[in-house]
Image (spheres, grey):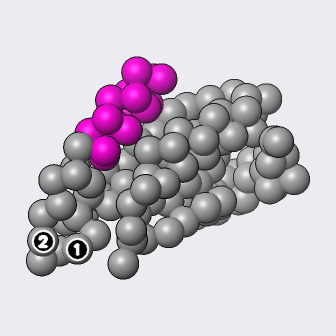
Amino acid sequence: MKDTKLIDVHALQEEARNSEHKESYRILERNPKYRIGIGARQVSSSQPIFFIEVLVNMCPNHSQVDLFLLEKELLFLKEVQSRGYSLSCQGDSYVACEISITPQNLATEYDAMKQIVKRTFQLINFN
């Protein structure tokens, strides 16, 4: 099922156009392990660039390294990179995965990413 009602492309575009930093962002899903969001950047006077971002917390338990979790995360990162997402380090333990996408494909890609994230992290205890 597409979450098109969660994605208001026109509102994102207007907020990006009118914001000081020329960007708007909506978090659509979050938990201690990951966050999925969508946004728009106004880089020129033309149409904004729309994007999907997934932030993955690589070390949610800062005191322990969970090798099982790191293996799952690595498989996830490889899969999203193969879908065209760029990967970058953010902060202490986060990896940001981002792709620029047409507004018409935002809902479809968000649905696909939700399925990939849930499939990858479904067996992991976040506590």
62 vs 44, left or right, is left
Residue 24 sits above or below residue 113 on the image: below
104 inside magenta stretch: no
Q: Identify the residue at the far right of this view.
A: 5
Within-10-Å neighbours for mark 2: few <14, some 14–19, many 20+: few
What residue lies at 32% left-to-right and 61% top-to-bottom? 57
Mainly helix, strand or loop, the magenta region?
A: helix
76 inside magenta stretch: yes
89 vs 43, left or right, is left
Residue 60 x, y percent position in the rendering: 28, 69
Asked if the residue under mark 2 is in contact with the one under mark 1, i.e. CB atoms within 8 Å, the reply is yes
Answer whether residue 49 is visible to the viewer in this image: no
Residue 26 x, y percent position in the rendering: 65, 60
Residue 73 sits above or below residue 36 on the image: above
Tell me which corner region of the image, top left, top right, bottom left or bottom right, holds residue 106: top right
Tell me which corner region of the image, top left, top right, bottom left or bottom right, holds residue 112: top right
- Residue type for callout 1: Asn
Q: Which segment is the magenta one?
A: 72-87
What residue lies at 12% left-to-right and 77% top-to-bottom? 63
Per the image, the residue denoted by label 1 is: 61
Front residue of 7 and 43: 7
Per the image, the residue denoted by label 2 is: 64
71 vs 2, left or right, is left
- Residue type for callout 2: Gln
